[in-house]
Image (cartoon, rainbow, N blue to C red):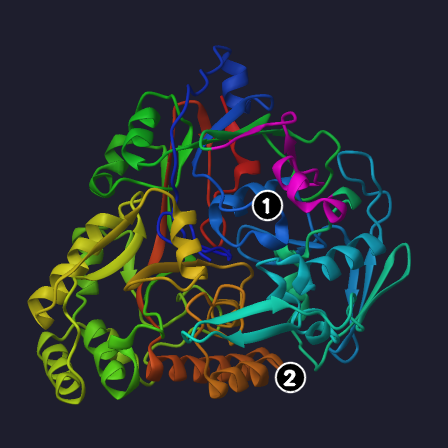
C-alpha cells in the first residue's frame, strides 16, 4: 500500500501522507489507579489521520489514509505480527506440494458484523470482484499470479488524435479459472507458475473477504463498510468526510489482533502542527506524523511517550515518462543529474533530524534480501560536479524547456514542504533550474493527478510495505500495468526479472532476481529513491503504551489507554 499504500501507495508521514481538517477533543484519563496500571479496555483512542481517497473497499484502497482504517475493519486469511511474520487468521491451513496449486482451508463459524457467514465462496467471490476490470479496483494487480487473471482483468487500449492513451474495461471472463470453492471451507488456487512465497500476500487488504452487500452496491457499501476485523463502524455515518471516522471494538472478533481499547476515532488534519499541539494538550492521543520542527524536540516534548524504529517504508521522487524534458537520451542524463543534485545526507539530518536515512536502493534495508551497492546505485550519492556535467551533456542533445519552474507535486502536510524546498534549492544551485512545490491540501488530489497522468512536473511518492518481500516494493509500484504504477513506467527486462524471481525455488534465488530488477530501475530511474524511514510516534498522557509494526503502521489494536 502502501503511501500510496499500499501499499498501500503510498501515505504515512511521507509514504502517502495525510490531509484534512481537525476536529474536536481527545479523551481524559481515568482517575482510578488500578485502571491506569492495567489499561482501560473501554477507552476510545483518538488518532491522527487524513481523508481517505476512495470509499473504504479493501481492494480499492492503496493509500495509507484509507488503508489504516480498512485494516482495522477487516481480517483476511492471514495477518502480520509486529515483526512482519505472516500468521494464519481466517485460514485453518494453507498448503501446496508444488507452489503452484494451493489448497486453503477456511475456519468455520466466522461472520461479518452483520451476521453473514464467511465461507470459501466469500473469498472466491471477493477476489473475482477485485480482479475484474469492470469493477475498477486499484489493487486488482495483486491477483496477477492466479490463472485466468488476464481474462478477468482485460482492458481495451486506444490512442486519441492528441496522443493520449485511454483504457476501458473489457473482461473476457467474469471469474478466474484458477480459483474455486470446492466446499464451504476449501479454496483451491492454481497459479500461472510456481511461486514459493505466494501465500505471504494473503494478509494484504486486497485479499480481504467482502459481504454480499459490497458486491451488490460497492459505492454505498464503501461509505458504511461492514467487516470482520477487530473494529467496526461506531454507527451508520461514522465517516464524517473531512472530519473523522469513528470505530468501536468488535466484541465478536476472536483473531490475533483483538483490541485492547474500546475504539479508534481518526481525526483529520491538514497540518501536523495543530495535531502536535493537540497531543501536547491531551486532546489527541497518538500520531505518526510530526511537523518538521518537532523532529528535533519530540523526545523531550513527550518523555517516555515516544517510540522510533526503522520500518519498511520509503520515499521517492517520481519522474513521469510523459514529461518531454525527461525523455530520450537527454532525459536519461537529466534523471541522473537530478539524483546527483539531491543531498540526501544533509536533508535527512537537517530536515528530518535522523528520522530518515538516505536511500541505498528502491527497497528499505529492513526487508529480507536487501542488498547494498547495487549496480547503478552510485547515482544516489550527492555529487554537485557530476550533476552539472550530466545536465550539460543533456543540454547538448536537447535543450531543457525552462519556461516554467519545475513543479514537484505534494500534499502540504507531514513536513513535505521543508524537504521539497531543500531539494528545489539543490536543483537551483547545482543545475541552474527553478523548481518549486506544487501544493495540494489533500493527498488524494495528488494521487488523482498522477492517476490521470496530468502532472506538469515531478511528484513525491513512497511505499509502505503490504507484506514483507522485496517484490512488494517493486512489482506493485514499477511493473507494467501495476496498480500503483501511476506514471506508467514499463520495461520488459524489468518485468521478466520480476517473473523469474517469483518463480524461483528459494528465497535467496528470488531475491537475487529482484535485486537484478532494481539494477534495471537504476538504469532507467523512473523515480529517484530518497530515504527510508525510522518511524517516530508520540502519544498523550491518556495512553499507557503504543508501538508500530514492521511496516511503520501503528498497531492501533494494541494501544492500551489509562
Identity of the residue drawn at 65% across and 27% down: 236
- Which label number is shown at residue 319? none
Instruction: Report helix, strand or loop for mark 2.
Output: loop
User: 10 Å neighbourhood of mark 1: few (<14), some, or many (≥20)?
Assistant: many
* Magenta range: 214-241
**C-alpha distance separating marks 1 and 2:** 31 Å
Residue 354 x %, y %: 24, 53
Residue reaching furthest to the right: 183
Residues at discs 1 and 2 in contact (Cβ within 8 Å): no
Residue that label 2 marks: 505
Does the rendering let one see residue 374? no
Which residue has dot 1 on it?
Answer: 71
Q: What residue appears at the point 23 percent right and 60 percent down from the top-left corner?
A: 407
Residue farthest toward the top in the current orientation of the protein: 31
Dot 1 or dot 2: first in sequence order is 1
Work out whether 297 lies above or below 378: above
Is 501 contained in the magenta span? no
Left or right for 422, reference 102:
left
Q: Is residue 176 above or below residue 285?
A: below
Q: Is residue 222 magenta?
A: yes
Q: Residue 138, how many percent across, how many down? A: 57, 59
Q: Position of residue 420 (x, y in %)?
A: 22, 55
- Quick check: 407 above or below 341? above
Viewer-side residue, 182 vs 545? 182
- Residue 200: quadrant of the picture: bottom right
Amino acid at each position: 500500500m502502501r503511501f500510496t499504500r499500499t501499499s498501500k501507495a503510498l501515505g504515512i508521514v511521507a509514504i502517502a501522507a495525510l490531509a484534512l481538517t481537525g476536529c474536536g477533543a481527545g479523551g481524559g484519563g481515568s482517575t482510578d489507579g488500578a485502571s491506569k496500571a492495567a489499561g482501560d479496555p473501554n477507552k476510545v483512542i483518538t488518532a491522527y489521520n487524513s481523508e481517505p481517497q476512495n470509499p473504504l473497499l479493501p481492494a480499492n484502497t492503496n493509500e495509507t489514509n484509507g488503508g489504516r482504517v480498512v485494516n482495522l475493519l477487516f481480517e483476511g486469511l492471514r495477518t502480520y505480527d509486529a515483526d512482519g511474520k505472516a500468521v494464519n487468521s481466517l485460514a485453518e491451513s494453507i498448503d501446496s506440494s508444488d507452489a503452484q496449486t494451493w489448497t486453503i482451508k477456511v475456519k468455520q463459524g466466522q461472520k461479518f458484523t452483520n451476521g453473514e457467514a464467511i465461507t470459501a465462496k466469500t473469498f472466491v467471490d471477493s477476489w473475482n470482484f477485485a480482479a475484474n476490470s469492470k469493477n475498477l479496483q486499484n489493487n486488482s494487480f495483486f491477483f496477477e499470479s492466479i490463472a485466468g487473471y488476464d481474462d478477468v482483468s482485460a482492458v481495451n487500449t486506444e490512442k486519441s488524435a492528441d496522443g493520449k492513451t485511454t483504457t476501458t474495461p473489457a473482461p473476457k471472463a467474469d471469474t478466474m479459472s484458477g480459483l474455486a470453492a470446492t466446499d464451504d471451507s476449501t479454496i483451491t488456487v492454481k497459479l500461472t507458475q510456481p511461486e514459493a512465497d505466494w501465500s505471504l500476500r494473503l494478509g494484504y487488504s486486497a485479499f480481504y473477504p467482502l459481504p454480499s452487500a459490497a458486491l451488490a452496491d460497492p459505492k454505498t457499501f464503501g461509505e458504511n463498510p461492514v467487516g470482520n476485523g477487530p473494529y467496526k463502524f461506531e454507527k451508520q455515518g461514522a465517516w464524517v468526510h473531512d472530519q473523522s471516522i469513528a470505530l468501536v471494538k468488535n466484541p465478536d472478533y476472536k483473531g490475533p489482533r483483538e483490541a485492547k481499547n474500546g475504539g479508534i476515532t481518526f481525526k483529520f488534519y491538514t497540518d501536523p502542527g495543530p495535531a502536535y499541539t493537540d497531543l501536547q494538550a491531551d486532546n489527541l492521543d497518538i500520531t505518526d506524523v510530526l511537523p518538521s520542527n518537532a523532529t528535533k524536540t519530540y523526545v523531550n516534548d513527550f518523555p517516555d511517550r515516544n517510540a522510533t524504529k526503522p520500518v519498511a517504508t520509503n520515499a521517492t521522487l517520481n519522474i513521469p515518462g510523459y514529461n518531454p524534458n525527461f525523455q530520450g537520451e537527454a532525459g536519461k542524463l537529466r534523471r541522473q543529474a537530478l539524483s546527483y543534485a539531491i543531498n540526501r545526507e544533509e536533508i535527512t539530518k537537517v530536515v528530518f533530524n535522523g528520522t530518515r536515512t538516505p536511500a541505498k536502493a528502491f527497497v528499505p534495508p529492513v526487508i529480507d534480501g536487501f542488498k547494498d551497492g547495487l549496480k547503478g546505485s552510485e547515482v544516489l550519492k550527492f555529487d554537485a560536479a557530476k550533476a552539472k556535467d550530466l545536465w550539460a551533456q543533456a543540454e547538448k542533445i536537447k535543450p531543457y524547456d525552462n519556461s516554467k519552474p519545475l513543479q514537484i507535486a505534494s500534499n502540504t502536510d507531514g513536513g513535505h514542504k521543508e524537504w521539497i524546498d531543500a531539494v528545489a534549492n539543490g536543483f537551483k544551485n547545482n543545475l541552474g533550474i527553478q523548481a518549486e512545490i506544487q501544493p495540494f491540501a489533500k493527498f488524494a488530489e495528488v494521487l488523482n493527478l498522477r492517476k490521470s497522468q496530468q502532472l506538469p512536473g515531478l511528484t513525491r511518492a513512497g511505499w509502505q510495505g503490504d507484506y514483507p518481500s522485496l517484490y512488494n516494493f517493486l512489482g506493485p509500484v514499477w511493473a507494467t500495468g501495476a496498480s500503483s504504477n501511476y506514471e506508467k513506467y514499463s520495461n520488459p527486462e524489468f518485468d521478466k526479472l520480476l517473473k523469474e524471481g517469483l518463480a524461483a525455488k528459494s528465497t535467496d534465488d528470488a531475491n537475487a532476481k529482484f535485486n537484478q530488477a532494481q539494477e534495471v530501475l537504476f538504469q532507467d530511474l523512473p523515480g529517484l529513491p530518497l530515504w527510508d524511514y525510522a518511524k517516530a510516534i508520540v502519544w498523550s498522557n491518556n495512553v499507557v503504551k503504543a508501538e508500530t509494526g514492521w511496516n511503520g503502521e501503528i498497531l492501533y489494536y494494541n494501544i492500551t489507554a489509562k
